[in-house]
Image (tube, rainbow, N blue to C red):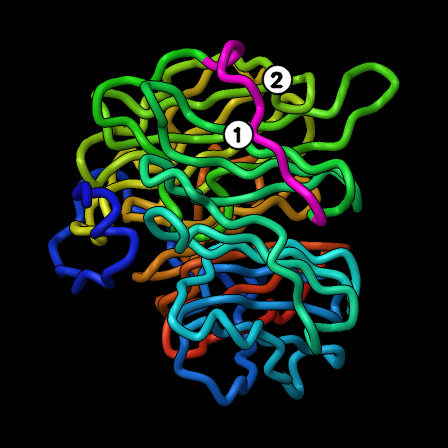
Amino acid sequence: MTIKRRLSIILIALTTLIGVGAVPAAAGPGDPGWRPTTTGSTARFRGLAPVSSSVAWVAGSAGTILRTVNGGRTWVPAGPADAAGLEFRDIEAFDARHAVALTIGPGAESRIYTTADGGRTWSRTFQNEDEAAFYDCMTFWDRRHGLALSDPVSGKFRILATHDGGRSWSVLPPTGMPPALDGEFAFAASGTCLVSTAGTRHSPDRAFFATGGGPVSRVFSSGDLGHTWQVTETPIPSGPSAGIYGLAFRDAHHGLAVGGDHTVPAAAPAGAAVSRDARTWSVATTPPGEYRSGVAWSGRSAVAVGPTGSDVSYDGGSTWRRFDTGSFDAVACVARACWASGEQGRVARLTRPL
């Protein structure tokens, strides 16, 4: 098993180091905060799928999936019975009844499940049979069309596609995928290594995925449902455990990338970057300064999370302000309602819209 795969499955103890570089401003009186919910679980939730301010799903360790329909006041177990020993790292939900969830791991441990009844029953719609593949994350443009991303197989990242809401999947031909760099892979840290934006009359649906592990971190993009990809380098430092961990696009042009090195969580001076054309990336003027695993847009503002804290940006990702020091792995916003999830069953909502 590769170093990356061991790091993805085994929870590594986080070290505490003194950060360097630009330090975000302290929380201001108008900044938001997190309102914790009580999940009754100790699972680590790296998969997060809010549908509204009331409905949300989380997925995590030990095959755990929970669902709420009342804004987090109560959470109900909703996971597949045959996934108890697996690690969920991504979940995509369309409403209170329909969701698609991804487990990670080598070979047959990489699976995709779907439910149409709020998690009471699940169908296993994909099980990886290629020992060289390792699936990290998923994205959906709508209820029918979605993609899943595997680390490189035979020198290229592998893409799965569905056109029926996750009920069936097919491996796309690798001919349109640029070669991977030596050591390059994607991080299954927050369900946001692969993201998408819905098309308009002026631009098609687009998908993006982010990488690390190799000599440079990169962002791949596709405008034809994952058949062909273009790739660009980013300034976020990359290495065996470093690179881009979280990606978010507000539209087909405006993107945010966050990351660092999860073994050095308190030091990531160039751990956030911004793009305004989906082709070129620049380091944030005032980055969070520490490792961040998840990022999400909320209107023209954004929020980033990691094990050492949460940050907000009101200027499209150029400058970030710390507003919380608690640990979260994933963040997602929908209809101006932002949710975060992480270790020890932690799930929270922002106290006010951004």
Secondary structure, mark 1, is strand
Q: Is residue 140 magenta?
A: no
Q: Position of residue 308 (x, y in %)?
A: 30, 61
Specify the quadrant that holds the N terminus.
Answer: top left
Residue corresponding to mark 2: 227
* 148 horizontally vs 197: left or right: left
Name, please, the residue furthest toward the right.
201
Q: Which residues are magenta?
A: 167-177
Q: Position of residue 166 (x, y in %)?
A: 69, 47
Mark 2–mark 1 distance (CA, rounded to whole Å) = 8 Å
Q: Nearer the viewer, residue 332 or 80?
A: 80
Look at the image and tell me whether residue 354 can be seen: no
Graded by Cα atoms within 10 Å as few (under 14), some (14 to 19) or many (20 or more), the crowding at tag 1 reads many
Query: Mark 2 or 1 closer to N-term?
Result: 1
76 left or right, relative to 150 = right
Q: Nearer the viewer, residue 45 or 119?
A: 119
Estimate the x, y position of residue 222 in percent, counting from the top left.
60, 19
Q: Position of residue 261 (x, y in %)?
A: 23, 43
Name the residue at 55% across, 72% down: 65
Q: Are marks 2 and 1 in contact (CB under 8 Å)?
A: no
Identify residue for label 1.
159
303 versus 200 height, above or below: below
Q: Residue at x 79, y 62 (%)?
A: 95
Residue type at tag 2 = His
